[in-house]
Amino acid sequence: MKFLRVNMTTQTVQWQDVPEEYATLGGRALTSIMVSDEVPATADPLGIENKLFFAPGYFSGTSLVNTSRLSVGAKSPLTGGIKESNVGGTVAFSLAKLGISAIIVEGKTVDDGYFLLNIESENSASLISASNLKGMRTYATAEKLHKDFGPGKSITCIGPAGDQQLLSASIQSTDLDGRPCRAAGRGGLGAVMGSKGLKAIVVDRKGKIPAEIVDEERFKKASRKYAKDVKADEFSGEILPQLGTAVLVEPINAAGGFPTNNARLGQFESVDKISGETMAKVIEERGGKTQHKGCAQCIIDCSNEFVTKEGEYVTSSLEYETIWSMGGMIGNDNLDAIARLDFLCDDIGLDTMNTGAALAVAFDAGYREFGDGDAAISLVEEIAAGTEMGCLIGNGPDAVGKHFNNPRVPTVKGQSIAAYDPRAIQGMAVTYATTAMGADHTAGWVVDQNLEAFGGTVAAQGSEGQVEISRDTQIHMAAIDTAGICDFAQTGLATEEGIGNVFTMMSAKSGKDFGQDDWDALGKRVIKAELEFNRNAGFTSKDDRLPPMFYNEPLPPYNVVVKVSDEEMDSTFDF
């Protein structure tokens, strides 16, 4: 396996052997540890010292299903701390099959030069001038690059938001149909890519380099068992293919944890209009696809294709977090408007969660009315146009709150919460507050352990046990993101031998013994690197807090506030 080091200042590329200390790492471990090793914690996130890392998961390119996950890492311009953002599609698998463990983008172009990186084979890559693509939206960019380089390519690119270096800018990646509808959305890493002068990465999808596995037969046997368990599980085998992640809308709303009208409410009165069941019905009636394969090696098919009344493509995939951020969070019950906003965010290159929360803060300040989907569409279009208000929205909720003097800004470390109100689901309060990533639900999703409907074991509205649950889940997820296993394929862990199969594959691939202690040590190593980086960047325990609104405003309908104390928060990573 190789590193591909790309210097944007000199416009050179260099192939390097992977150093021994990184040989058994992938995904988030590779990006976070390398950011910690190579980027000064005090660096300007949009300056020459920051670096942008792209790393397939450790299992990407192997026979294991649902492992086409790419970690993107850098110092975040949104949070000012370390960031890993995760994306599916085809790029991770494509890079792994070319024998590439990581792409390291360093330096930045001079004189506003703009380039794309073309990776043609396992030993051929070059920077090509792409000044003509600057300002172009992602769908048009992907279409042009497919035309110029051929259809058999994985494309990762930024849109106008990244070109403008706005703080909510995402990095978009193509799905199996070649559409840039998969987002490494969180943390503003699209702005980092734009600051480097890199518009796109084009990766050949025809690589044939076999994964480096010491015991191939042992690995395949465990991977087949794991895949069988994923397929047999009711959630990943039946429910996700039917409803996708939108299946969560109704139960989270019922629990009073669906942040509505800028988190003034925990339930959305019109939730039945935007539920997963309603979405599936609309898609079926219009001739869209409720079951769609978006990522390489996927056997779940949780993606969908939302279409207009005339059957024209709008977006893929319309997921739970976006249905919340562009629906309940701004009081919008128009499913077509939500789908349009999802498409626009992908096309302009924006994190739907941070953008939806920014709109909600503006609406909360009286700039527009809650429920006005057309106003939301117009404001998102302004981001692409680069207007003063568009740039404000594109820079996220904190910028909007400051502009309108609205203190009700639901962010931690500058990044918006996700679709789970921390007052109704107290375990998410711990994850939002303590992860080095800002309010990131994927760092430690503990909803299942909180809510009775998901088999929860603690009282969702109480503090007892929440720190321990969040800590253990964050350690586990750091390891999962390193392996490159899709979050939804974790159903393969539900069986008696589930995690054992993962340990077997880790051992078979590396040739070293691997067990639970090693798994925990891996997760802790990643988190320690991330926390150390943030401490060196100036973060303190005061940054591991939720906004006052979550402590001071009881959330209807259950009228609860966050109960986890500061002392409990500070004990989360006592290891």
Image (cartoon, rainbow, N blue to C red):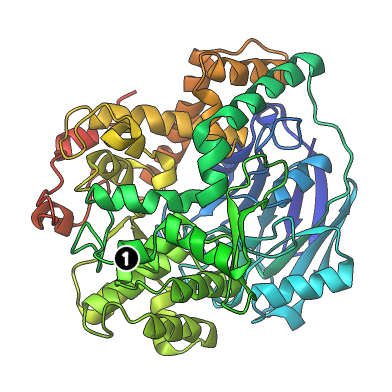
Q: What residue type is labelled 1?
A: Gly
| Total marks placed | 1
- Residue 365 coordinates in the image, percent (x, y): 21, 79
Q: Quadrant of residue 260?
A: bottom left
> In screen coordinates, is 536 left or right of 5?
left
Q: Looking at the picture, tell me which residue is in the foreground, 154 or 301.
A: 301
Q: Confirm whether residue 481 shows in the render.
A: no
Q: Quadrant of the N terminus?
A: top right
> In screen coordinates, is 149 left or right of 436?
right
Q: Is mark 1 on a helix, strand or loop?
A: helix
Report the residue that reaches farthest toward the front: 285
The residue located at (86%, 73%) in the rendering is: 147
Q: Looking at the picture, tell me which residue is in the foreground, 280 or 563.
A: 280
* Residue assigned mark 1: 328
Q: Quadrant of the C terminus?
A: top left
- Residue 374 coordinates in the image, percent (x, y): 40, 85
Residue 530, above or below 253:
above
The residue carrying pointer 1 sits among few (fewer than 14), some (14 to 19) or many (20 or more) residues within 10 Å by Cα, namely many
> In screen coordinates, is 376 left or right of 8?
left
